[in-house]
Image: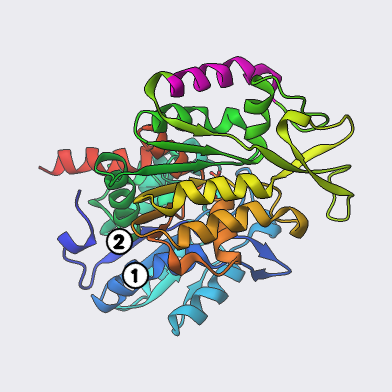
Amino acid sequence: KATIRDVEVQGKRVFVRVDFNVPIEDGRVVDDGRIRAALPTIEYLIRGGARLILASHLGRPKGRVDERYRLDPVARRLRELLGRPVHKVDAVVGPEVEQAVAGMGPGDVLLLENVRFEPGEEKNDPALARAWAGLADLYVNDAFGAAHRAHASTAGLAQFLPAVAGLLMERELTVLARALSHPEHPFAAVLGGAKVSDKIGVVARLLEKVDRLLIGGGMANTFLAARGYRMGSSSVEEDRLETARETLRAAEGRGTALLLPVDLVIADRFSADAQRRTVRVEAGVPEGWMALDIGPETVERFRAMLADAHTVIWNGPMGVFEMEPFAAGTLAVAQAMAGVKGTTIVGGGDSAAAVTKMGLAERMTHVSTGGGASLEFLEGRVLPGVAALLDREAVQR
Ligand code: 3PG
């Protein structure tokens, strides 16, 4: 795969697609992990004397201007992190943008408005991609987090400009691909999060690769129900019980250790100040109560399974970690991973947010910036943003 290191950037106008889809509260970026992750590419291009046109989406504004999703808070944070000016325009494309680009010198940084304000973005409209291509000499895709979207700025643009990967995109793909193709054993995966339906593709693929599969979080409820345990008012996907049974059979057939919770922290309602207690799964969850975290004995078992692992991939929290009383399971997995001697990879989304919040991100080999993208990659699906770069390379050759 070609990256920015393989091309001349000096003096070039470079359109860089980044994933600055970050949480914002009261006009401030509250988790800047994705912005920091893009800095190596941005700083490389600045040092190389390129003129940078940065583009990102934020939220899901549905193809029109929505004041809640302007990128100004992102521009402010980026200025602080870079320690240099970043010119933010209020337009995505058109005369205002053209004028701003015309006024740029080497090393200057321009940030466009939220690309999803344009209806052509999500439709992957070639007219929009062509208009952007007219602004630049080179297209760099560093938005791994959005690589599972076939949009104008994530895929379409590669048709109209020389296209290469940024350093974050390169690192994400290399780390994830190496873990899957040449893992050091024992190889363990920890999967959590709300739904089996979101993760079933990943479960199936990881079962072929890992020695140990640890399942917690909301999705464990469906597996426990499939085993015949009473789950009370816990969220259970009734239409996935058969899938869960098949998965349990497949694991048994392969001799993969599949661990489900043996105890649960349950609550009488979905609230931080709910009444709570710990129950063993055989005892069942009483009616009106719901499982919101894995219990202490499960934590011990999971910890033991991770302690001597040499490769660990984690995606999805073990409980409702946003509420302090139900955060212990997720915290324990994060801590256990921090102690692993080997490769530790945290899939994006909630688990990445959890390790960042817990201050453990630095202790991992890699915290992915992709939520949906890392899941689709782990499932073995082709990411349109990556495929567009590869196709482009084939054209260039
Ligand atoms: C993400 O947060 O997973 C990416 O930025 C993609 O966002 P999307 O799901 O709105 O396309």
Residue 10's place in the image compared with 284, above or below, is: below
Q: Disc 1 on helix, strand or loop?
A: helix
In this view of the protein, can residue 372 be seen by the observer?
yes
Which residue in the rendered view is the most extreme toward the bottom? 83
Q: Is residue 49 magenta?
A: no
Provide the residue span drawn in magenta. 237-252
Residue at 33% x, 74% y is: 43
Residue under pointer 1: 40
Badge 2, how many Cα within 10 Å: few under 14, some, many 20+?
Answer: many
- Residue 93's spot in the image, x, y percent? 48, 56
Mark 2 in CB contact with mark 1 (< 8 angstroms): yes
* Residue 320 place in picture, x, y as percent: 71, 49
- Image-quadrant location for residue 193: top right
The image position of residue 242, as x and y in percent, is 60, 14
Q: CA distance from mark 2 to mark 1?
A: 7 Å
Disc 2 residue type (three-letter): Leu
Label 1 crowd (10 A; few <14 / some 14-19 / many >=20):
few
**Labelled disc at residue 167:** 2
